[in-house]
Image (cartoon, coloured by chain):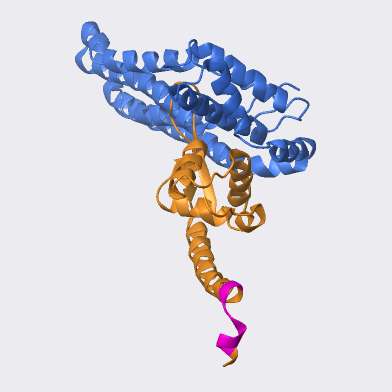
Chain colours: A orange, B blue
Amino acid sequence: MAGKISTDLIRGHTDTIILNVLRQGDSYGYEIYKKIIELSKRQYELKEATLYTAFRRLEQDGYILSYWGDETQGGRRKYYRLTDNGKQLYEQSRENWTFAKCILDKLIEGGVNDVLK
Amino acid sequence: MMYSNENGLDHKVSVYIENLFSGVGGSQQLFDLKEELSINIKEKTIDYQSLGMDDEQAFKEAVISMGDLGGLVDDMRRIGQDTAKQSVYSTMAARISTAGIVTGVLLSLFGLFVSAIIYFQDYSLQDAIGPGIFIVAGGALITYSMLTRESRKKYAMNRTRALFYALSIGLMLFSLFVSLITYFGEGEMYAAIASPMLFFLAGIGLFLYLALTETDRFKNI
């Protein structure tokens, strides 16, 4: 791997990453954790500790809701589902991200002379 | 490739979780979070085992790779101290449960009254049993609502499990209902036993299964 993502950079996007997983179907903690690893092609891992903190916050704010699964062996899983507010938040965050990505690209890689010409 | 002894893993996880949250005041949220974290650690341990780690190492790796759970512990401690917050968390559930109990009781009483009216109108027990179906529905609803209610001594049961309990009570009441209908309809005792038998067996089977796999919902205050 050439680079790495700083914690600061990813922190602001944890919620959006979770919303993106849940947008594609209800899921539970450990599965969401594995899906995020898969989505990053095994290059990034969001710790469960971070995930569960985010679940609690997102649920309190009404962006996701939870329900218990009916597994009987070895305990039950708590599933999460995106609410309509959550879908809206996801779309908004994605737009913001596309915009920010474009601007940051210019700010970090652009040459001053190219612009001022 | 399962844990050499399934209960061994269960025990390890529960000891770890209890230690992690030791001294944290009880709350419904803590109760739920413990269950959520436990199953996560269990599934992760089993995944690590299937990669070839031994039991002990798999469990350790699973715990370490969860990350720093300190923030969640602090959250829970805050909620445990703040009883006002707790009651906010449970008011919605409590309200639904209360509505369920009231509706269940009214439904049952309605069945009872209609039954009595029909009976005293034409003195036919067979017709009078019919509205008993409201009592069946009411009984199931009351069961569900009582179990999903958080009380001072016990945490609320999760909704799926409560639903199964309600189903088992419903099945048993329904079999009684079918039995009475058959008995007063055909006057044959053997038919009154035979026709509802399957419902009753299903209901009692489900009930026993649930009762025997019950987890501890008592608050330790």
- Quadrant where the C terminus of chain B lies? top right
Position above or below: A100 against B106: below
Left or right side of B120 for A100: right
Quadrant housing residue B155: top right
Residue toward you, B198 or B186: B198
Inspect this view and state whether residue A3 appears: yes
Left or right side of B183 for B89: right
Residue toward you, B134 or A100: A100
Position above or below: B63 against A18: above
As drawn, the residue found furthest toward the top would be B190
Q: Residue B199: where, in percent of width, then height?
A: 30, 18
Quadrant housing residue B19: top right
Left or right side of B30 for B5: left
Q: Residue B124: where, in percent of width, then height?
A: 28, 22
Position above or below: B91 against B208: below
- Quadrant where the N terminus of chain B lies? top left
Position above or below: A97 against A49: below
Q: Does A113 lie within the magenta span?
A: yes
The residue shown at (56%, 55%) is: A3
Q: Residue B93: where, in percent of width, then height?
A: 58, 40
Residue toward you, B218 or B109: B218
Q: Main secondary structure of the magenta part?
A: helix
Q: Residue B2: where, in percent of width, then height?
A: 44, 16
The residue shown at (78%, 26%) is: B23
Q: Does A20 lie within the magenta span?
A: no
The residue shown at (21%, 11%) is: B191
Residue range (magenta): A108-115
How many numbered badges does the structure rendering display? Answer: 0
Residue toward you, A98 or B215: A98
